[in-house]
Amino acid sequence: MPPRDTTDAQLAAQYEAFPYPARDPREEAKRLIIGSPSHLREIDHWIFGARRPASQPLNALMAGGGSGDGTIMLAQQMTTLNRPGRVTWLDRSTEARRIAEARARTRGLTNITFEEGSLLDLPRSGLGPFDYIDCCGVLHHLPNPDEGLAALASVLAPGGGIGIMVYAPHGRTGVYMLQEALRLLAPTDEPPATRVETGKRVWKQLPETAWLKRNPWIDDHLKGGDSGFYDLLLNPRDRAYTIPQLAALVAGAGLRIACLVEPLRYNPDTWLTDPKLRARTAGLDPIARAALAEALCGNMGIHIAYLTRDEAPKADWADDAAIPVLRELDGPAMARALRPDGLLPVTFDSLRVQIPLPRLAAALLTRIDGRTPWSEIVSSIPAPADQITRDRAALVAALEPLNRLLLAAP
Ligand SMILES: C[S@@+](CC[C@H](N)C(=O)[O-])C[C@H]1O[C@@H](n2cnc3c(N)ncnc32)[C@H](O)[C@@H]1O
């Protein structure tokens, strides 16, 4: 399908000139870029409730896969954990494909299929159905994001799920003002390289009062190279979603939000400890609660959400045969670093919160290695059974909302 309109054609030209994000395939020999959505542990936990067997092949789609961050992460995690299935990269950008393919080659990954095309063609593409679909940083650039999400939903397998990232307005304070200025000085019909050159001149001259200069949470224009600068400030089309707007987008595609990442950030009670206020937050529905947290914090520049068609199965934390896993954390190292006051300091985009951990946190964390089931973990702790049960539940209550303690696929 050709671009939908002039702006969409400019968007397509942008990602040919500046594939996003800027990546050097040689770096794959040194590090794996990890993130959300689409971390395999998150998919197992938040979409499938840790009930879908690891031996069942996972057919995944990365819609608007770009230069390949999510594709490479998921394909590598599946390879490392010996998980069967395939990851299909889909994007309109030939240059982004070239980089993503080179990254896959550097890693020797053989579980990726590359498809060039528009995600809006998915309903007629013959691709799918997919058990999992990633769409990270793409929907908000489309001429009609509702149509985009509906196109993804049309190739979603029964019981499957979607991981999305869309921009959020408050944490992007200053971005849209500068975009407005740059549309006047670097019009969207000029060649991408000329626009970047002009944009950088403007950035150098920007008065101190410009809100983006005061926004500590956004740095793509400073650290993301020309590709980051363009994507943030010269993008011909992007829009940001508040939580109620995101909820409407999701509902419009016949989907529901299974999880907002990290759940703790979207719980207003994380930020409001006054019992009188908590009595009020208790009366709000889940979307209103998340909207309140977003409005209170003011620092959210993106929303990451896992979506399902039907209610996602909840992980069964009481199952003694289940295997807990710390997402990208080393349990023993974490146990050693615990503070005597039992508080775990956590920071979300410069917003600090202290999470109380139970007495047996260190004993539990030391034993969580992603291979050992709860039954073995608890039977090796020298403490009364009721205390272990209580503290295990308290550890889960503290770390699951941080997206850090999850259950592994059986
Ligand atoms: C900001 S990049 C995100 C890349 C990647 N998902 C990530 O998070 O690193 C947006 C990507 O969406 C792609 N894109 C935009 N519109 C598209 C469409 N209609 N169909 C497929 N890809 C599209 C662009 O080519 C670009 O690679």
Image (spheres, rainbow, N blue to C red):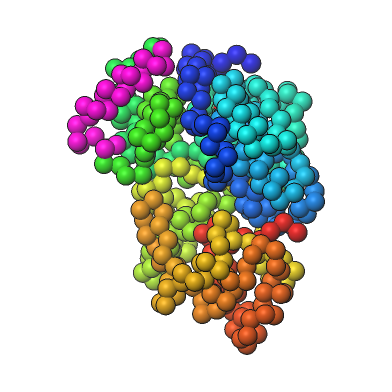
Is 308 on the left or on the right of 128, as rendered? left
> Start and end of the magenta stretch?
191-213
Q: Residue at x 40, y 30 (%)?
A: 225
Q: Residue at x 56, y 68 (%)?
A: 332
Q: Where on the image, by quarter, is ligand 1?
A: top right
Q: Residue at x 30, y 24 (%)?
A: 200
**296 in the magenta segment:** no
- Figure quadrant of residue 389: bottom right
Q: Is residue 18 visible?
A: yes
Residue most toward the bottom?
Answer: 384
- Residue 287, horizontal then vertical, whole percent: 51, 51
Q: Residue at x 19, y 31 (%)?
A: 207
Is 123 on the left or on the right of 191, as rendered? right
- Residue 183, horizontal then vertical, whole percent: 34, 20
- Residue 43, horizontal then vertical, whole percent: 65, 49
- Residue 404, horizontal then vertical, whole percent: 55, 59
Relative height, residue 156 to residue 80 (above, below)? above
- Figure quadrant of residue 99: top right
- Figure quadrant of residue 25: top right
Indicate the quadrant containing the C terminus: top left, top right, bottom left or bottom right.
bottom right
Indicate the quadrant containing the N terminus: top left, top right, bottom left or bottom right.
top right
Viewer-proximal residue among 63 and 203: 203
Q: Is residue 150 visible?
A: no
Viewer-proximal residue among 157 and 352: 352
Relative height, residue 256 to residue 356 (above, below)? above
Q: Overall secondary structure of the magenta stretch?
A: helix
Count of marks placed on residues: 0
Relative height, residue 9 to residue 161 (above, below)? above
Is 404 on the left or on the right of 205, as rendered? right
